[in-house]
Amino acid sequence: MAGNTSVPGASVVSRGLALLFSFDETHRRLTLSELARRAELPLPTAHRLVGELVAGGALVRRPTGEYVVARRLWQVGQLAPVETGLREAARPFMNDLHATTRATVHLAVREGSEVLYLERLSGRASVPVVSTVGSRLPLHATGVGKVLLAHAPDDVLTDALTRLARVTPYTITQPARLREQLDQVRRDGYATTVEEMTLGACSVAVPITAGGPVVAALGVVVPSLKRDRTRLVAALQVAAQGIGRTVG
Amino acid sequence: MAGNTSVPGASVVSRGLALLFSFDETHRRLTLSELARRAELPLPTAHRLVGELVAGGALVRRPTGEYVVARRLWQVGQLAPVETGLREAARPFMNDLHATTRATVHLAVREGSEVLYLERLSGRASVPVVSTVGSRLPLHATGVGKVLLAHAPDDVLTDALTRLARVTPYTITQPARLREQLDQVRRDGYATTVEEMTLGACSVAVPITAGGPVVAALGVVVPSLKRDRTRLVAALQVAAQGIGRTVG
DNA sequence: TAGCCTTCTTCCACTGAGCGAAAGGATGCG
DNA sequence: CGCATCCTTTCGCTCAGTGGAAGAAGGCTA
């Protein structure tokens, strides 16, 4: 294909997707050269492919020259089966929590060795809570993450313990300490974090199990959930600007 | 490129996107041949491209052989700037409406000559309300649509009046009648539908203007909204299994 | 069992779509 | 004015992409 050094296993389709997947939570707007760097493509190649993605309606070029994910991609994304039933069932409970606490409420599941945020109700916190819908964060530094990890299979746990990345000075990075905390999470039935992900923020999280009220609302729709009533399905979290170590 | 009849303006990228955009509200699962048909591609070509889309993480192949939009695409879709501020600001109001009425609450904007649904809180209606987040429907057959149309520029209105597709026996298809209704919507400040989109369902919808309470919540974030305080921004709708013509 | 669907998969020879180094603009900064 | 950085266009080479054809795997009828 190429008149020159084209990386072996790189089809046009995979390159196009690499460009689309270059966008993430912290990079919602990218310039052409950023896109080329992230997708590891020569600039002229990126230029042409990005142009086609824009023509095809997957990306939009802002007047500034930056590229953004197009609305149309949002629309097809909505068609993905992403725990739709769970999200609908959890909504009322999240609303209650939000009304009571005025804090940020999160619904999340475990995806591999990360937390995937499914739903979010923003609180009035002046401390910005980093996680938005669709974003992923490490398991060990978030409330939902600890809950999900505490009830995860052994291989996931051992894998997670090997790389406890430091996010803030208060992130738990010692495997032994995290193990202790997870034991306690299983005993108490909830997990807490204090400034382990964001300075000035704290969180409380609880598991959603197949026998719990949220999933009960799903009973009719998803009968299989009734079988193992203690199986962990997801986790709910309340996060707020808190009485952290660095704050009052 | 092809050893054979390849359609002129069809690059690999555009073909890949055509495959992705083959999915819609009523076709969340597609077989290979359906994909090929919808994207207007020869079957072997579709086969290969779809395989690459799966390898690239944009689609997932179900055990049944059907293809579905992948979670990863949902994630990038979340990064699209789709009235994020509006949706957040509208949430509390939608919750109130939902708590009070127990019906399905919708937030929508106009996109061209269609309604685009941005947010939805499901009611307990036994009649399924067709619109889900990300879906588009005609302006003239929905409550939100009528509101948006009533305050739309003239060219949009005249365009919409030329093709009033019949959805149910009660859909308004006469331009004169719709015009009358839109006049009334402007006078009354709200729009109603009775079985015009779905048999057995009715709806009430109100406009969200730049001066209104929902947008007021956005005032700090989007100062430009304060300029034209009567500009239509979006519409809110309550839809339910109703005292329709064919029911009660 | 045979015959006939439809849908999916693999093969393969041809060729033009895709490639990217290189050069040319367009800004911006000191 | 020199030197950045970013974006855009050009252009000849060539192999990635192409799709008809044929085969495999079911499903339904007789």
Image (cartoon, coloured by chain):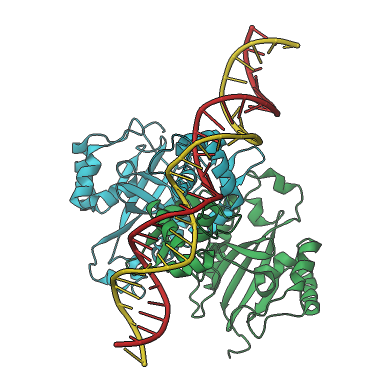
Chain colours: A green, B cyan, C yellow, D red
Give the x, y percent position of residue A141.
66, 75
Please state which of residues B101 and B65 is positioned toward the viewer in this rendering.
Answer: B65
Image side of residue A31 versus residue B138, left or right: right
Image quarter where the C terminus of chain B lies is top left
Q: What is the total number of numbered labels drawn onto the structure image?
A: 0
Picture layout, residue B102 above or below residue A7 = above
**Looking at the image, is B137 positioned above or below residue A246?**
above
Q: Nearer the viewer, residue D9 or B211?
A: D9
| Residue B172: percent from left, percent from top | 28, 36
**In the shown orientation, is residue A89 left or right of residue B133?**
right
Q: In terms of image quadrants, where is residue A67?
A: bottom left
Q: Is residue B122 visible?
A: no
Q: Quadrant of residue D29?
A: top right
Q: Is residue B82 left or right of residue B36?
A: left
Q: Residue at x 54, y 65 (%)?
A: A40
The one of C29 and A25 positioned closer to us in this rendering:
C29
Tell me where residue A58 appears, x and y as whole percent: 43, 54
Task: Locate residue B224, reporting x and y percent.
Answer: 28, 71
Taking A125 as reference, is B154 above or below it?
above
